[in-house]
Image: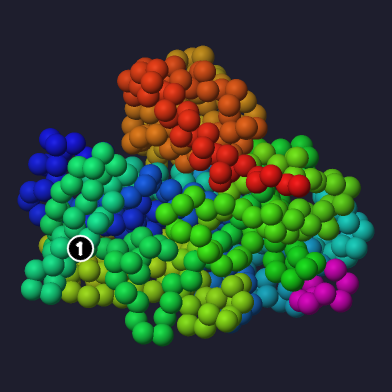
Amino acid sequence: MLSSDYLKTLSKPAWDVIVIGGGITGAGILRAAAQQGLRCLLVEQHDFAWGTSSRSSSMVHGGLRYLGSGNWQLARDSINEREWLQRSLPGLVNFIPFLMLHKPWQWPTHHVFQLLLAIYDGLAGYRTRRWLNKLKIQQVLPYITSTCASGSVFQDALTDDARLVMRVLQEAKNDGAELLSYTRVEELVYKDDQVVGVKVCSEANKQAILEATVIVNATGVWSNKLAPLASGLTLRPLRGSHLAFPAWRLPVPAVVSFFHPQDHRPVFIYPWHNATVVGTTDLDETQKLDKEPRITLTEIDYLLTAANSQFPQAALTASDVLSCWSGIRPVLSQKRQRQPSKESRNHLIWQQPGLISVSGGKLTTFHLIAKEIMALVAQYCPEAQPVSADISPWLANESISSQWLYYLSPQQLQRLSGYYGKAANKLLTCAKITELTTIGATQTLWAELRWILMNEWVTHLDDLLLRRTRLGLLIRKGGEEYLPQIKQYCQQLLNWDDLRWQQEVQRYRRIWLSAYQLPKVS
């Protein structure tokens, strides 16, 4: 956060690049700029990954539906990026089977779907598709409805979107980038009709003017506030909501996909962090974008209906829900009357002198967007040095010492390597042996809390429980039962006194109750 002393180091000399927006798009651009040797700074008005990048479905996929709608180029690019991310970040981006359920006479039929998957596999360069008959489906999913006739299996990937942002930001920091959270860009600074900087204000109301050769506006659903879109285009915020259940209430071994019985939209039920998630909706967001987005009663009914239509024996109700979350997609639209799910998920880049803006796009393609932006940044910063990935990888891992196998499983070590990269060994070295245990039924180690509080820019308790970890999503009542132990870590490592702790707990409970717990269901 901005302090008087830190302001002096930020204000002079001018930066090469200032990136506005701390989601996955902004993080990717910052990482690319830092790797090319530019003096770069990222400014985020809330916490890193506060917006869409911690509230998505966390799927890293080629976008099979984009292929089905004829957008083969987006599908091809997404598949290539999926492959690259999984190779770069095993443990954070992991392949998982996807199972598309078919009903008799439902379009597309399993024959058509298998043909589509053949093209999908062809773009990837290897085969993953299989067809399962009704008997095999019932063996894999014992509680499945009897109306399911068959299924098509293929492969895509899952991640933790907020952790992916943190991993990319850490790589940028390692190459010299600077970051500011809870710092709002109040206005752009102009000189002779060219953007030359930004005026910022911190959460503590400290202000500064930061100059740069070029500004990159990667603020997602807020991007048109800084840079108006071209005539005929609108930025259409679309809300997607999710419900999380304990895994034992609805155990699924794969991402199960099917069409909702009400509107024929694709819906997913999938395993995520030892829980089961049902998502997602696709609705116009009507409330102010600076507020925490929240699920509606209509969406709760929609998602419960979807799950129970395929797994009637589970008989899921609102009382089974661990948590919920809603994210706002920044979708660029030309036809407002179009159905939300029909809108393009392509990104758009537009410019004015000194300012490059980008919005839209997919989690999977953030790296491609960063490369496109850097090609434009190079026009302002010719000293940028392209780096060979063979010499300096964009995302770097290192092996974790085998001595930790005495305490942790190979799967746990791979997860730590994916989540923390080169810092994984340091994380374990800093830990007490008693901290190499998981918190409740989650995969998070107590040792991770120590490392995160020491190294990952935690300003508020909700940063820790909702984004650096997912304890607030995965433990009933937002992890309330573990707050006494977490208090000890925060007071020791962040120097929070009792008053500050009480304020942070009150803030966290208010946020969790308003945006991550179901509203009252009559």
Tally of numbered discs: 1
Q: How is the image coloured?
A: rainbow
> In the image as oriented, which residue stretches furthest toward the bottom?
232
On the rendered structure, is 173 left or right of 94?
left
* Label 1, residues with CA under 10 Å away: few <14, some 14-19, many ≥20: some
The secondary element bearing badge 1 is classed as: strand
Q: What are the residue bounds of the magenta stretch?
A: 103-111
The image position of residue 473, as x and y in percent, is 59, 39
Q: Answer whether residue 498 is magenta in the image.
A: no
On the rendered structure, is 484 left or right of 234?
right
Nearer-the-camera pick, 412 or 482:
482
Give the residue pinned by disc 1. Answer: 188
Nearer-the-camera pick, 350 or 436:
350
On the rendered structure, is 508 left or right of 46?
right
Q: Answer whether residue 105 is magenta in the image.
A: yes
Vertical arrangement, residue 167 with respect to residue 219, above or below:
above
- For badge 1, the amino acid type reads Leu
Q: Residue at coordinates 71% horizontally, 76% vertically from top-left?
A: 115
Vertical arrangement, residue 471 with respect to residue 308, above or below:
above
The image position of residue 15, as x and y in percent, is 14, 54
- The answer to whether residue 58 of the structure is visible from this angle is no
